[in-house]
Amino acid sequence: MSITDFANIKAIAFDFDGVFTDNRVLVSENGVEYSMCNRYDGFGIMNLANLGIHMCCITSESVPISLHRCQKLSLPHFCVGNSDKLLELTKWLNSLSIHQSNAAYLGNDINDISCMHYVGYPFCPADSHVSVHGSAHRLSKTGGDGVVRELADLITTALLNK
């Protein structure tokens, strides 16, 4: 996969935990969960939105952390608490009339593999689970450490040099 190919990407779907976060969770004594996100990713999302790239977040988790972060990033479409990520991805791309060959997916674990096989541009963070390594292009950044920004910068560069 060449960086010039990235100019063909029209839509990107992201997993949340392990992509926007480092996949760890802090749980308080009251059961409230906390995760760390990287602000660099927000600039990447903004740059892609300015270039007209469609984006969504699809996560199987139903905790409000992902919902709040997606709203803060102004991600126009997000699906939380759904274990069938491929179904959600397919419905979303169909609603936009975007062919799967022009879509990217960034995920980190076994429940992301079906989406990775479906899209034309599958990606995973450097620290993703070994089970996805054969299904996606590994980026150099880890989850929660700017991997979304890394991918956004690659796509932005490709589009601006098109």
Image (tube, rainbow, N blue to C red):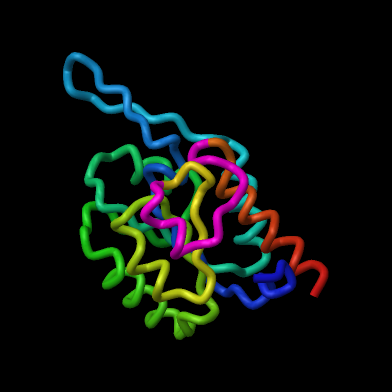
> Seen in the image, is 63 located left or right of residue 132?
left
Where 19 falls versus 49 (above or below)?
above
> Seen in the image, is 59 located left or right of residue 137?
left
Q: Is residue 18 part of the magenta span, yes or no?
A: no
In the image shown, does 81 or 67 lie closer to the viewer? 81
Which SS type dominates the magenta stretch?
loop
Q: Could you tell me which residue is drawn at 30 percent across and 70 percent down?
A: 86
Residue 130 in view of the camera: yes
Q: Residue furthest left?
A: 30
Q: Quadrant of residue 22?
A: top left
Residue 24: percent from left, percent from top:
36, 30
Where 115 falls versus 95 (above or below)?
above
Q: Quadrant of the C terminus?
A: bottom right
Residue 73: percent from left, percent from top:
50, 47
What segment carries the magenta color? 129-144
Residue 30: percent from left, percent from top:
17, 17
Q: Could you tell me which residue is drawn at 53 percent across and 40 percent down?
A: 142
Q: Could you tell me which residue is drawn at 46 percent across and 56 percent down?
A: 133
Q: Quadrant of the N terminus?
A: bottom right
> Seen in the image, is 17 located left or right of residue 137?
left
In the image shown, does 96 or 86 lie closer to the viewer? 86
Residue 71 in view of the camera: no
In the image shown, does 55 or 146 lie closer to the viewer? 146
Where 78 falls versus 28 (above or below)?
below
> Seen in the image, is 12 located left or right of residue 53?
left
Q: Quadrant of residue 92?
A: bottom left
